[in-house]
Amino acid sequence: MSEKVKVIEKAEIPSGLKIILGLPDVGLVGVIAASHIISKLKLEEVAYFRSNLLPPVIMLEKGLPRSPIRVFGNKEILVLNSEIAIPSASIHDIIEGIINWVGEKKVEIVYTLGGLPIPNRHEIEKPRIFGAASNEELLKILDEKEIKAIGRGFLVGPQALILSLCAERGIPAVTLLAECFYNYPDPEASSIVIQALNRMIDMKIDVSELIEKGEEVRLAMRDMMRRTQAELARMKKSHEYDIPGYYIR
Amino acid sequence: MRRRKSIFDIMREHMEELEELAEEMMDQLIERPSWDVRTHSLEPLCDVSVAPDRVIVTADLPKVDPRSIRVSGVADDLIEITAKMRVKINFEDFGVTHRRGEFSCFSCRVPLPVPVDTSRAKARFRKGILEIILPRKRGYEIKVE
């Protein structure tokens, strides 16, 4: 395991579980979705990450210190969530540390949740969902579930690193991305991503509360969005808007 | 042998310096609270984008009463946005018990990168997002021969 990133397991974590990743990115779509899933499934903290590459920040909960990057779970599923923006300078090592641990745990499949920024998001009633996967068999499953794969285009940030590392190491991974605001927390996009995940793994996570409490979520996520936006700019996230160069079919 | 710097090297160095400066400014913006207990106000998330003919400013305004939104031009490159919330919010609503204060509005001043004609600006509020479209100042027309 990478020396730079340590994982401390608080409970026994069996191998072969599914894992959902919610890392800070555009619209905080993945983070909001992961938090909602953790709360709906009443998951307990089972592990946490420690790394010198993160800023010296802890979360205080009822007076006790907690790591900002934690894994919650039950006997079937694990959900990783980050409560701070990940510094762009350490994103490679942090993601590699996460995927190293995911590999050690021999997870069945990785679902990584996020957003696809669109400039006119506020004019769109219902965001569309897109996917990408680490292998062709998973692309077929996406197709069966009527989730359109992104044919060609750039992916920047946590999603890009997760998908490429998983593909390289033969870890099955699916990225689910809903159209979203670039720099405003987007609980509606999170609900679309959860609905797609429900189809993929036969879950029934209710999203009505996420929609009803959308304004509360947007208020609460303001500061995390500000910090995430600054890191995204450093990662040149706007590269995702670029049209890939000319190619011959 | 030392190669003379080409114009591209010089341009790249300048761009890098500019980028570093922009990053520093961004960090300074973040290193202060996004709320002000004295004025009971929260700073909204804002975005500015510049098109050839106009500047588009958006702001995320959750829990706001749409009728209370006020946008004013302070200068030709600075606008002010204020809006009252439908309900008062305090730190405990976010689970924070060690700070005191109550918030009832959003308020911010948005500097624009280019001058605009605020008298011809238009604004609308949709899905909790305020969008302000400000036409850019017209220059002198240059005749093409």
Image (cartoon, grey):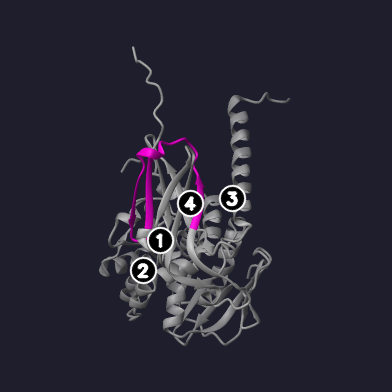
Classify mark 1: helix, strand or loop: strand
Q: Which of marks 2 and 1 is nearer the N terminus?
A: 1
* A170 or B8, nearer to the observer: B8
Judge the density around disc 2: few (<14), some (14-19), many (≥20) Cα neighbours within 10 Å. Answer: many
Residue A164 in the image: x percent, y percent?
48, 60
Which numbered marker is on residue A237?
A: 4
Residue A193, numbered circle: 2
Checking the image for residue B26, the label placed there is 3
Q: Is residue B129 inside the magenta stretch?
A: yes
- The Cα atoms of the two marked residues, 1 and 4, are separated by 12 Å
Residues in magenta, as a range = B107-134
| Chain of residue at mark 1 | A
C-alpha gap between disc 3 and disc 2 = 30 Å
Q: Residue at x 38, y 57 (%)?
A: B129
Q: Which residue lies furthest to the top in this view?
A: B145
Q: Are marks 2 and 1 in contact (CB under 8 Å)?
A: yes
Badge 1 amino acid: Gly
